[in-house]
Amino acid sequence: MADQRDIAGRLGLSIAVEPRGVPESADTLDAAAQIALARNSGQSLITPKPAANGFQVTSFGPAETGFAPPVATFDSPTAAALVLNGGQRLYVPSDPTSPTHRWVDVPGLQAFYRLPDVDRKRTRNRWADRLSQAVPGIDQSSARALPIPMLRILLAHHGAAVFGVSKVRRGDPPVDAGGIVNGVTLPLLRLPLREPDCYLPVIGQVEGKLESINAWDVGAGVSLGVIQFNADRGALFRFLWRLWIDDPDLFGATLTRSLGWTMRWDGDHPDLVSGADGQVRLHGVGADKARNATYLQTGTIEGSGRNGPHRRKVAAALRDCVVWPHVQDLIVDTSAWYLQAALDSIHAEGIGPLNPTAPERETFILTAVLLSGAVRFSSCLKRLLIALRPWSSPADKLANWTQALATTAEPCPTLFPRLKLQQQQAEQVYEQVLRLLD
């Protein structure tokens, strides 16, 4: 039985880790994690079996702990994972090569383990192959054999190698426009099912992955994640504020150390503070989008054009944050918040809301297609919704959306190839949804 330890969150929560009861055995860490995550309440400690292969899952602590932060402190040198609140959080050491007291949540595992074998294997192999291609000493076979929590953390730990910042040149003649990070991770379906989160695994297949960063185009400053949110509506600042609150150590080690960034709350919005003695203060509001984008593109409020080296520096610092699974959860939350206004417009037209326990196929697929169009051209959503009004039911609207799209003003008809592909991908994700709910 493990020594008594304490797990502590940054808000002062402290739980004594005193293993009790009869341990359950598992051959692998993935199997042990599934045992712990399947428990409806309580806390679980996963440790290697003493002097034997495999793992054991032992209960500890109270039935509920209440708030569980995404980052916790735990000083056990032998434990493999901790699960709190009946599967709400699964923590593993943030440095698998030299464990420290910092443990981080790996969200989404309950849904991941319930995926069909073919879908789970496909996702695992995307992560493993990216890791083995970038990190010397880790071949494809050994990467694919890693337990999922360790695979996710190793991707983050080696993030600089796995997710390099590529230089981007644009124009005629080409000039240094900045950089780009190509991601690999699609959002995992969450349980319980909820909108608009459930559509992100569809949209991400054409728009961006959770590690994707665009720091080369004009007007956005820098764009992140599955819908590539940026300075528009202060979305980037909303994400940064959540990171500042949820994981100040990571924020400080990456964004403060590299860029001099800190955050301050200002009435009803967060501000990004930068420069010596906080001389630059950017307000996280939509009205300041142009000013904020200028700073992110050039490094100065009065700048013009694009400072390529500065933009790659910003992309690299943000990359060192978004490679972590618990930070990717913040990307999902921010993306869902950003899409809520578009989803409200869709609901107002009699499409949805989606039943979380028995989602209607046509409603799911149609909503995913409409939101994908809104991400690419926001003005086209209203036009397409109006064009769909002659058809009353979601099923009829889905059957006739291509006809309706052809009647809309430019650039909306150019969405056809994208949305046709998204319809097929939404059909596939819907099948995953049904299997998760079964």
Image (cartoon, rainbow, N blue to C red):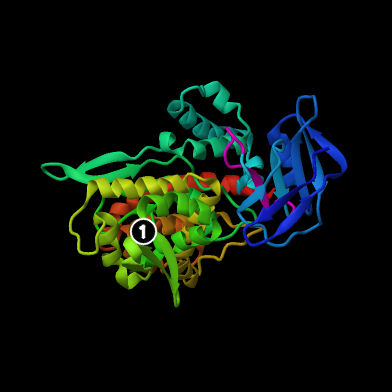
**Which residue is located at x 38 percent, y 40 percent?**
182
Residue 98: within the magenta? Answer: yes
Magenta range is 86-99
Q: Residue farthest to the left?
A: 173
**Which residue is located at x 68 percent, y 47 percent?**
74
Q: Is residue 120 left or right of residue 414?
A: right
Q: Which residue is mark 1?
A: 230
Place of residue 263 in the rendered image (x, y in percent of width and height, measured from the top left): 43, 64
Q: Is residue 53 left or right of residue 96?
A: right
Position of the N terminus, as image quadrant, is: top right
Q: Secondary structure at mark 1?
A: loop
- What amino acid type is highlighted by mark number 1? Asn
Place of residue 403 in the rendered image (x, y in percent of width and height, measured from the top left): 35, 57
**Which residue is located at x 72 percent, y 62 percent?**
66
Place of residue 354 in the rendered image (x, y in percent of width and height, measured from the top left): 58, 62
Q: Is residue 417 above or below residue 197?
A: above
**Residue 166 in sight from this viewpoint:** yes
Work out whether residue 98 or residue 161 is closer to the camera in this orientation and state it.
98
Q: Residue farthest to the front?
A: 277
Chief secondary structure of the magenta span? Answer: loop
Work out whether residue 314 or residue 112 is closer to the camera in this orientation and state it.
314
Q: Picture quarter containing residue 369?
A: bottom left
Work out whether residue 148 or residue 205 is closer to the camera in this orientation and state it.
148
Work out whether residue 411 or residue 298 is closer to the camera in this orientation and state it.
298
State how many labels appear.
1
Place of residue 163 in the rendered image (x, y in percent of width and height, measured from the top left): 41, 38
Q: Residue farthest to the right?
A: 21
Residue 375: within the magenta? Answer: no
**Residue 365 in sight from this viewpoint:** no
